[in-house]
Amino acid sequence: MIHPTDSVEQIAARADLTPDDVKDAESRLFSLGLLRSSPGGGRVAISPESAADALLAPLEQDILERRIAMATTRARLHSLSGDYLEARSLRSAKTSIEVVEGIDNIRAVIDDLARTCMTSLDALMPGRPTEEAVRAARPLDLRILKRGGKMRQLFQQTARNHPPTVQYVEALEREGAQMRITSVLPSRVLIYDRSCAVLPIDPAQTAVGVALIRDPAVLSFLQQLFEHYWDRASEFSEAERTSGPEPTGVERDVLLLMAAGKKDEAIAHQLGVSPRSVSRVVARLMDRLDADSRFQAGVRAALNGWLS
């Protein structure tokens, strides 16, 4: 039997261990609180339950203090809800037009509008959205649909040839969104709950800044503008790609010049090829576009987004 006051060498001899093994074991037991030094000398063995209580008590106290701090912070933030709603109602005054500048501020405002949107989102989406914009919009728009909100989005023909946009449209259509496509759109417009519209300050550089419109007269005009383009558009999913791949190289050059009203001879001279070569390219393009005239070919090429 090992006595609490035995030396390391005595314990090693009795336990058939080396002194170093005994010292290592003692060190680990002390660190776990399973051994304590006795006031009278030697060591005192501590039960695992008591050791656990002594070892974990500071951690449990720290966790308790953190939980109290979290609860206090949460209560303070919740106490500001009334101030936030009051400030938001002032920002939403019926005659207000607010300008928001900077891409981070714009994203924060749109995120806030999307999170609080309850009934509808109508959007005009000209051009071809960036992949980053599509990724950012997808979760926000899906949440609106899952809350029971209605969504109508109108894209230009060029978006039909953009895989990320096509995937985004398909995902939202599965959740009940209505998506249409048209050839021309005037500007990007987002109308949330028919009570707030987002317009770019500069349509050519949407990241510069936006205007938040809550004026009833302006909102009414923007809603009518949306309905005008919506009624004349076709379903996104029904827009068939029957004209084959988008032309590239010489074919695209010929198409752009043909759409600009150039004759074969003028196109040949500008591109440095023979008029016969141009005639063959024009014939192939008209056949692919199922067009009876050069004008009709230009219109269908524009609808396909080939002239962008």
Image (cartoon, rainbow, N blue to C red):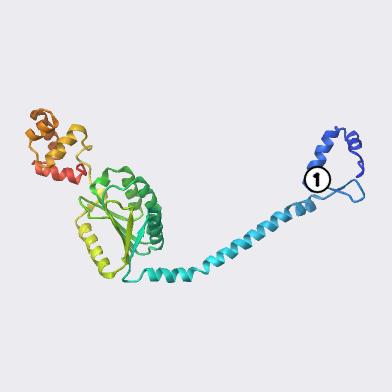
Residue under the image location 59 percent in, 65 percent down: 72
What quarter of the picture does the N terminus occupy?
Answer: top right
In this rendering, the answer to whether 266 lies above or below 143 is above
Residue under the image location 78 percent in, 52 percent down: 49
Element carrying mark 1 = helix
- Left or right placement of residue 265 versus residue 145 in this view: left
In this rendering, the answer to whether 143 lies above or below 160 is below
- Left or right placement of residue 209 versus residue 182 in this view: right
Instruction: Using the rendered view, name the quadrant where residue 68 is placed.
Output: bottom right
What quarter of the picture does the C terminus occupy?
Answer: top left
- Left or right placement of residue 254 versus residue 65 in this view: left
Q: Where is residue 7 in the image (x, y as percent from the top left)?
A: 91, 39
Q: Position of residue 59 (x, y in %)?
A: 70, 54
Local packing at callout 1 (Cα closer than 10 Å; few below 14, some 14-19, many 20+) is some
Residue under the image location 83 percent in, 38 percent down: 23
The residue closer to the viewer here, 37 or 266, is: 266
Instruction: Using the rendered view, name the quadrant where residue 26 is placed.
Output: top right
How many marks do you count on the picture? 1
Q: Label 1, on which residue? A: 30
